[in-house]
Image (spheres, rainbow, N blue to C red):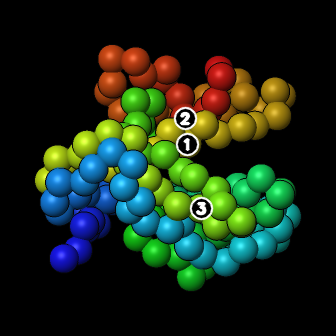
Amino acid sequence: MRRVAIRRSPIHGKGVFALRSLAAGERLLEYRGLVTTWREAADHCSARAHEEHTFLFGLSDGRVIDGGRGGNSARWLNHACDANCEAVEESGRVFIEATRTIKPGEELFIDYSLELPRSDRRKARDIYRCQCGARSCRGTMLRGT
């Protein structure tokens, strides 16, 4: 039985939703796509600047997974400051795991914790505004701002 489905999200665009109850600690998805360099991914995203989304997931070794090229449903995970899932990196692969029990119909979220150079943060705050609505919302998808 499928565990998740892609639907329109009240937060932003498309989202990933639970089709059944999901247990805390359950591995739900792998974030898939073309593994490449940041430079190559940025060049490719610049060519698609008219699109609303980028699907880049940074790896600890400095490479990036571009979910926009060969990606799967995990690319539609939206951000929330009080996320119910987390990304776990293992050997250059990223898995999405539930951090708490998730009810059927509930949207799955991760905390993007985006990082930008200090000089870019002020102007990027509007671009990366958070819309999660959580009581603990920090107002941005950026880490530590």
Q: Which residue lies under the disc numbered 2?
A: 141
Please tell me which residue is depicted at 77% across the width and 33% down the height of the picture. 120
Res. 122 image quadrant: top right
**N-terminal-most mark, 3 or 2:** 3
Return the residue nearer the eye: 83 or 24. 24
Nearest-to-viewer mark from 3 and 2: 3
Res. 90 image quadrant: bottom right
Please tell me which residue is depicted at 71% across the width and 65% down the height of the picture. 91
Q: Which residue lies under the disc numbered 3?
A: 94
Q: Position of residue 35 (x, y in %)?
A: 72, 74
Question: Looking at the picture, which amino acid does disc 1 mark?
Answer: Tyr
Work out whether residue 91 can be spotted. yes
Question: In what element is the residue under mark 3?
Answer: strand
Question: In what element is the residue under mark 1?
Answer: loop
Q: Are marks 1 and 2 in contact (CB under 8 Å)?
A: yes
Q: Which residue lies under the disc numbered 1?
A: 112
Q: Position of residue 26 (x, y in %)?
A: 36, 55
Question: In what element is the residue under mark 2?
Answer: loop
Q: Residues within 10 Å of mark 3 (few under 14, many from 20)?
A: some
